[in-house]
Image (tube, rainbow, N blue to C red):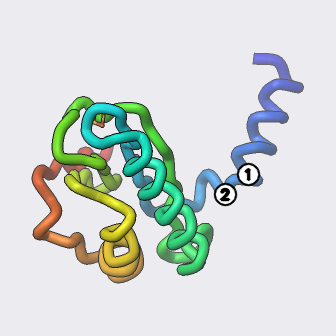
Amino acid sequence: MSDEREEQLREVAAKLGVGAYHRHVFLCTGPNCCTPEVGTAAWEVLKREIKEKGLGAGEHACYRTKVGCLRICCHGPTMVVYPEGTWYHGMTAERIPLFVQQHLVEGKPVEEWVFARNPLPLP
Ligand code: FES
């Protein structure tokens, strides 16, 4: 990779805070596990809540990514949180605020919405 390209990538990553996150949330916005409207509404609330709770940096810093499919494709919106590997179903906009507070801030998954777990082993 050229020095210029590498420098640009490092700058973008640094600007996004990559390297300081404790969690990463992937939210599927459909179209098979939920309608795009339901998925997009959940995504907008997730962005808002993470910002309002100040989770862009600090000890609970959480990166967020909207994805097209997590291959579950039913009872969504589907969401997975790493590093714990906690899989959630039905993560509509209404559920997102409690999820953000309880899981991302307090570190306690909302058990009634969890359907699978797959923590990734450390190398
Ligand atoms: S469309 Fe959401 S998991 Fe496949």
Q: Is mark 1 within 8 Å of ligand 1?
A: no
| Residue drawn at x 23%, y 70% as measured from the top left | 109
Marks 2/1: CA–CA distance? 5 Å
Residue furthest to the top in view is 1
Nearer the observer, 34 or 50? 34
**Vertical arrangement, residue 91 with respect to residue 112, above or below:** above
Give how far across and how far down residue 74 sits, in percent. Answer: 17, 39
Answer with the quarter of the image where residue 20 lies: bottom right
**What SS does tag 2 mark?**
loop
Say whether residue 106 is left or right of residue 49: left
In this picture, is 71 found above or below 63? above
Residue 56's x, y, as percent?
60, 68
The C terminus, quarter of image = top left
Which residue does the image show at 70% across and 45% down from the upper left?
A: 13
Say which mark, if any, is on residue 17.
2
Three-letter code for the amino acid on which mark 1 is drawn: Ala
Is residue 69 or residue 61 the one in the foreground?
69
Q: Do the residues under discs 2 and 1 have CB atoms within 8 angstroms? A: yes
Closer to the camera, 56 or 90? 90
- Badge 1 marks a residue whose secondary structure is helix
Picture quarter with ligand 1: top left
Q: Is residue 9 left or right of residue 46?
A: right
Q: Position of residue 90 (x, y in %)?
A: 23, 55
Residue 16 relative to residue 62: left or right: right
Seen in the picture, residue 27 relative to 98 is either above or below; the reply is: above
Which residue does the numbered mark 1 point to in the structure image? 14
Instruction: Give the residue type at disc 2.
Output: Gly
Q: Residues within 10 Å of mark 1 (few under 14, many from 20)?
A: few
**Picture quarter with the N terminus:** top right
